[in-house]
Amino acid sequence: MPSGRRAVRTAVRQPAVAGLFYPADPRALAALVDELLDSVEVPAGDVLAPAYVVPHAGYRYSGLTAAQVYARLRRHAPEVTRVVVVGPAHHTPLSGCAVSGAQQWRTPLGELPVDPYADALAAAGYVVVDDHPHAPEHSIEVQVPFLQRALGEVALLPILVGETGVDEAAATIAAAIEPDPAGTVVLCSTDLSHYLPDERAREQDWRTVRAVLDLAPERIGARDACGVFALRGLVGWARRTGLGARLLDYSTSADATGDPTRVVGYAALAFA
C-alpha cells in the first residue's frame, strides 16, 4: 500500500476529453447517452451486481458495450447511492492508488460530488490524494456522463490504480466499499487488447475474459488490458468475496468502424 497523505481538495475537476471522447455540447451528449442506454434490453429478472467491468474508449467505439452496464444501473438507480470507479492512469506513471482531490467532477451535463470517504482511504494508507494523474485522464471521466444519465445525483469515488499487487488493489476496493456495501457499485474501467488485427484481438481477449470468468487474476497479463492492475484487483476482490463473473457483451472497434486491421477490444462484465 502507498503511504497515506492528505491534501487540500481542489473545487472542481474539469473535463479533459469533452469534445474528443464524447460530445462537448450538453444536449448532444445527453441525447447520445440516452440513445445508447435505450438500445439495451435489460432482462426482466436482472439483479443489481456489486461490481462491473466497463470500457472507456470514445463513445463511438465502446459506447454500446458500456451501455450494457449502465442500462442495468439505470434499472436499479434507487438502490445505488455511491459508485467507486477504478481505472488506469494512461498519462502519468503511478505506483499504488491515487484518489482525486476535487470536491466535484464536472462534465457538460453538470457535476457529481466526490465521496468524502476518499479522505478516510488516504488516512488509512490505501490511496494518496493526487490531482496530477487525474487531470488529463479519460478512463474515469468517460464513465461520468453515463452515471449522470443513468443514476442522476450519486456520490463518485474516483481511484486511479497504478502498479500494485493483486492483494493491495483488492484491499483498496474492499475498503472503498466499506461505508455502504449495499448501496455501492464498483466499476472497473478498462479496455482489453490494443491495435491487433481483429481476429487476433478476439482470440487474445477471449483468453482475458476467460481468466476473469475463472476468477484468475494471475492469468491477466500487462498487454491484455490497459487497466490491468485495476482489473486484477477487482477479480481478486471478487474471488475473496465469493462472487462469480458473467460476460454481458464483447466488441471491438472494428464493429464500429468496419476496419479490422488495428482494433481495440471492449468487454462488459458483471460480478455477482
Image: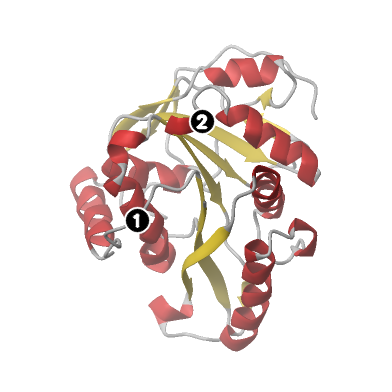
Is any part of residue 164 visible from this angle? no
- The quadrant the N terminus occupies is top right
- Left or right, residue 269 beside residue 240: left
Residue 54 on image: x %, y %: 49, 55
Find residue 178 and report its image quarter.
top right
Q: How many marks?
A: 2
Q: Residue at x 58, y 21 (%)?
A: 118
Residue on which disc 1 sits: 46
Residue on which disc 2 sits: 181
Q: Residue at x 64, y 82 (%)?
A: 203
Q: Residue at x 72, y 17 (%)?
A: 124
Residue type indicated by callout 1: Asp
Residue 9 on image: x %, y %: 54, 15
Query: In 3D space, how far apart are the residues under numbered discs 2 and 1 (Cα atoms)?
Result: 19 Å
Circle 1: element type? loop
Relative to 63, residue 255 above or below: below
Is any part of residue 259 visible from this angle? yes
Find residue 101 and report its image quarter.
top right
